[in-house]
Image: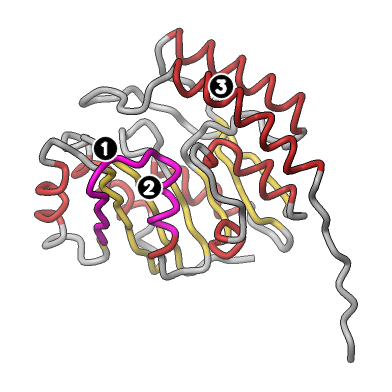
Amino acid sequence: MQINQLSVVVPVRNESGNVASLISEIDAALKHITHEIVYVDDGSTDDTYIQLKGLQATFSQLKIVRHAKSCGQSTAVRTGVKVAQYDWVATLDGDGQNDPADIPKLMAVVADGVDLVGGNRRASRRDTWVKRISSVIANTVRSKMLHDDTPDTGCGLKLFKRDAFLDLPYFDHMHRFLPALIKRCGGKIVSVPVAHRNREHGKSNYGTIDRLLVGIVDLFGVAWLQRRAKIPNIIKED
C-alpha cells in the first residue's frame, strides 16, 4: 500500500528555537510526495507564532493553528488532525528530538488493515535518566495491562489514518494511549525502530513526573474502555 499524500501535525509550545530547522527537515524528508505541515501553537508565550508566520513565505504548505492558552499535547494533536486534509497523518514532537527522516520508514510498512505505525526509540533514547527510567516503567506497566503491541507508546513519531483517530474517544493525554485505543477498535498496530536526538534548543514544556502520575489514572480508564469494547461483524449484502 502506497501513501501519496500526507499531513504532518506538530504540536508546539514555546519552541521558537526549533521550528525553522524542523520544518525544513520535514519538507526535505517528504519532498517526493504531496504533503502539508500543520503546526499547532499550544498557547506559546515566546515568539513561536512569529517564527511560524515568517516561515510561511518559504513553505507554502505550512498551516498554523493557535490555541489562545495551552490545552496540552493531546488536544493540540487533535486540533491539528481535525484541520488536516489528507487521509494519513504523521505526528512528531516539536522539540526536534524525533527525526523527520524516519517518516518514510513508517510509511514503508503500511499495509492493508494497518491503522497505526508507531516509532520505537528504545534503542536510541537521548534523554535525561529521569525521563528514561519513567519511560521504561510506564511502558512496562502499560504493556502488561493493555497488551497494546507497542514497546514505546510515548514516542511522538506516529503515522495513522485520520478517520481512525477521529473515531477514538477523546480525553486529555490520550496521545499516549493511541495504540491501545486503535487496537480496541479492531485496528492493527506496527512498530518501527526510529532515531532519537538530543534537544538543541529550549526545554521540555510538558512535565515528566506529572505525566507519569496522570498516566497511572488514565491507564485504568483505558483498561475500562477496553473491557467494554464491542467490535461488530458487519454483514455485507450484495
For label 1, the SS is loop
**Residue on which the image places disc 2:** 76
Q: Are marks 1 and 2 in contact (CB under 8 Å)?
A: yes
Tell me which amino acid carries mark 2: Ala
210 or 103: nearer the eye?
Answer: 210
Q: Is residue 36 magenta?
A: no
The numbered dot on residue 123 is: 3
For label 2, the SS is helix
Tell me which amino acid carries mark 1: Arg
User: What distance separates the C-alpha of mark 3 from that of mark 2?
Assistant: 28 Å
Which mark is in front, 3 or 1? Answer: 1
Q: Position of residue 178 (x, y in %)?
A: 60, 44
Q: Are marks 3 and 2 in contact (CB under 8 Å)?
A: no
- In the rendered structure, which segment of residues is drawn in magenta? 63-81
* Horizontal side of residue 219 vs 159, given as left or right: right
- Compared to 115, does 98 lie above or below? above
The residue sitting at 21% across, 26% down in the picture is 201
User: What distance separates the C-alpha of mark 3 from that of mark 1?
Assistant: 27 Å
Q: Position of residue 97 (x, y in %)?
A: 37, 31
Q: Which circle's residue, 3 or 2, is located before the other in the chain?
A: 2
**Residue on which the image places disc 1:** 13
* Horizontal side of residue 160 vs 80, given as left or right: right
The residue sitting at 20% across, 61% down in the picture is 59
- Compared to 114, does 205 lie above or below? above
Quick one: which residue is furthest to the bottom in this view? 238
Tell me which amino acid carries mark 3: Ala
For label 3, the SS is loop
The residue sitting at 56% across, 26% down in the picture is 215
The numbered dot on residue 132 is: none
